[in-house]
Amino acid sequence: MSIKSEIERLRSELPEGVKLLAVSKFHPVEALQEAYDAGQRAFGESRPQELKAKQAVLPDDIEWHMIGHLQTNKVRAIASFVSLIQSVDSQRLLECIDREAARCGRVIDCLLEVHVTAEQSKSGWDVDELRSYLASGAINTLKNVRIRGVMGMATYTDDMTVVRSDFECIAAIKRELDPQFDDSFDTISMGMSDDYPLAVECGSTMVRVGSSIFGERVY
């Protein structure tokens, strides 16, 4: 399957209102250009330096999403152009993004990454910690970030009942938080190449698909 045909297949399968994010980390700019030529505009990267290097040579109308764990000392590298930071997993990171966005004269869209699995290797807010932070009102002092929704990952397993439970949990957290934000809090980013149909069934509004589009990553 070509990149173009795979993007067309995914687009035809995804319901209206579900966005396709092409996860392009570790793939060469030529592959991203091919996806761009097929009409894809939203791309997800996990390393700030790689993201910055690709942004410099690819078309200006690409919407760049940061989806990997982001260290505060790397925010400045992407703050001037990133469209959405999906992997916001701490108060410290959120405050850093707010400062860097202000420095650039921007408001940066962010998702709150929530941790719902038993796997310690995955990042994200502990849900009780997130509740406490939001209850404190500290987030209301941040004027240069806009919280657009939540992002999460399911357990890495072939057991789809576990995966479904994780997705339902992420969607439930989004519903719980809805009253604390305005109408722009509209995004649930969950689901990848192996499980995106189930994620959509559970309420995902954005799926992060890499290997189905670009093939297996070359590390």
Image: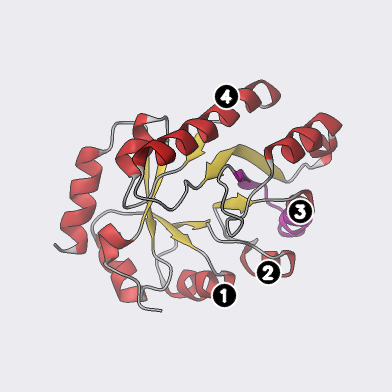
Label 1 vs label 2: CA separation? 8 Å
- Which residue corresponds to mark 4? 175
Residue 131 appears at what percent x and percent y?
Answer: 74, 33
The residue drawn where x is 36% and y is 76% is 28
Q: Residue at x 57, y 58 (%)?
A: 82
Give the amino acid at mark 4: Arg
Report helix, strand or loop for mark 2.
helix
Asked if residue 207 is positioned above or below residue 26 in the image, the reply reads above
Residue 184 visible to an observer of this rendering: no
Q: CA distance from mark 1 to mark 3?
A: 21 Å
| Image coords of residue 172 (percent x, y) | 55, 27
* N-terminal label among 1 and 2: 1
Q: Amino acid at mark 1?
A: Gln
Q: Which residue in the structure is indicated by mark 3?
A: 102
In the picture as drawn, the residue positioned furthest to the top comes out as 179
- In the rendered image, residue 50 lying in the magenta stretch gets the answer no
Residue identifier under label 1 = 49
User: Label 1 neighbourhood size at 10 Å, few (<14), some (14-19), many (20+)?
Assistant: few
Mark 2 lies on residue: 74
Magenta residue check for 110 = yes
Q: Residues within 10 Å of mark 3 (few under 14, many from 20)?
A: some
For marks 1 and 3, the one nearer the N-term is 1
State the image quarter where residue 206 is shown: top left
